[in-house]
Image: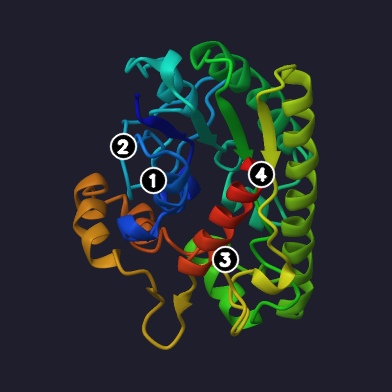
């Protein structure tokens, strides 16, 4: 009998930003599936950091792995998959947040177009284009196609100082006309909650509109207590506020020279520094375990 085949498409979350290979949730899903598939389980990952869905085009130099880059887009990941897609048994995918832009979600001054319209365009319109392509590409009747959702990046439980530092990493400063930092942070928290709610609804709508019973939406199950900079209960990588905002993840030292090569120009300082800290806001080890648990529950 042939091995049970898993394919992962998407952005930095299914890539497993900042995680060692055994800690990535698709690897854990593979291992958890082994007991039900004595013939073996294989995993092929095309997801990478920064990928956009790309339904309306994308620019930039293709990147892979830990260095954020729009391309290969998730549609390109699907379109170029040529290893007998008709025999794949499980597709894990996500997409949409990079089409909206994390900096856009975090910036209360990014008002036009509205966050709601950006989220609809990315998480419904673009995702629907992607799902139709994935449905056609991975044609095995028993193949399961699971679309994972997102989460609240910043919540009311997040440490305000950490949030301010995170905004700085993304080039967002508190305007001089704002009297108190919390007057700026409250809208940031609201926008993060709005993106979580709207992206969930739009992804679910895209799954329904795709009209393929093999496609299912998988919520992350994250709560506000799991947002970044929440002591003890965060499921996301943060930044060390006492050590120059150094990243917390175990692959930061490996990512750094890759960022140096990808952003070597004298005008790329901000992009290079952001790349060093690319893990911030992504699921940590416990967060990846939560994704794995949600996925496995949807397969039962």
At mark 2, the secondary structure is: loop
Of callouts 4 and 3, the N-terminal one? 3
What is the residue that sits farthest to the bottom in this orientation?
242
Of callouts 3 and 2, the N-terminal one? 2
- When the figure is inspected, residue 190 is found, relative to residue 26, above or below; the finding is below
Give how far apart the Cα atoms at labels 4 and 3 are.
35 Å
User: Which numbered dot is residue 63?
Assistant: 2
Residue 13 placement, left or right of 216: left
Give how far apart the Cα atoms at labels 1 and 2 are.
7 Å
Instruction: Determine which residue is flagged by label 3.
Output: 167
Instruction: Determine which residue is flagged by label 1.
Output: 68
- When the figure is inspected, residue 21 is found, relative to residue 116, above or below; the finding is below
User: Circle 3: is it few (<14), some (14-19), or many (20+) Cα within 10 Å?
Assistant: some
Q: Tell me, yes or no, whether the two marked residues, 1 and 4, touch with CB atoms within 8 Å.
A: no
Of callouts 1 and 3, the N-terminal one? 1
Q: Nearer the viewer, mark 1 or mark 4?
A: 4
Q: Nearer the viewer, mark 4 or mark 2?
A: 4
Instruction: Determine which residue is flagged by label 4.
Output: 298
To which quarter of the image does residue 7 belong? top left
């Amino acid at each position: 009998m042939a091995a049970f085949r898993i394919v992962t498409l998407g952005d930095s979350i299914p890539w497993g930003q900042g995680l060692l290979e055994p800690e990535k949730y698709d690897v854990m899903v593979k291992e958890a599936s082994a007991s039900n598939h004595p013939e073996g389980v294989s995993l092929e990952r095309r997801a990478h950091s920064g990928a956009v869905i790309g339904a309306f085009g994308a620019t930039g130099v293709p990147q892979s792995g830990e260095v954020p880059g729009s391309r290969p887009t998730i549609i390109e990941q699907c379109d170029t998959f040529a290893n007998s897609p008709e025999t794949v048994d499980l597709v894990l995918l996500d997409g949409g947040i990079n089409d909206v832009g994390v900096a856009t979600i975090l910036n209360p001054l990014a008002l036009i177009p509205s966050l709601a319209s950006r989220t609809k365009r990315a998480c419904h319109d673009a995702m629907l284009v992607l799902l139709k392509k994935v449905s056609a590409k991975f044609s095995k009747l028993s193949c399961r196609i699971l679309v994972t959702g997102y989460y609240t990046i910043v919540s009311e439980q997040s440490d305000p100082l950490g949030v301010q530092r995170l905004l700085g990493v993304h080039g967002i400063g508190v305007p001089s006309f704002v009297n108190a930092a919390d007057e700026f942070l409250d809208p940031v928290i609201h926008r993060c909650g709005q993106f979580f709610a709207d992206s969930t609804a739009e992804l679910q709508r895209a799954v329904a509109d795709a009209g393929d019973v093999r496609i299912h939406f998988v919520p992350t199950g994250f709560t506000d207590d799991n947002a970044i900079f929440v002591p003890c209960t965060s499921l996301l990588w943060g930044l060390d506020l006492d050590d120059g905002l150094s990243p917390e993840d175990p692959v930061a030292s490996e990512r750094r020279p890759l960022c140096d090569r990808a952003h070597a120009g004298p005008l790329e300082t901000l992009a290079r520094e952001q790349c060093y800290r690319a893990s911030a806001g992504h699921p940590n080890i416990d967060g990846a375990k939560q994704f794995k648990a949600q996925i496995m529950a949807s397969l039962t």
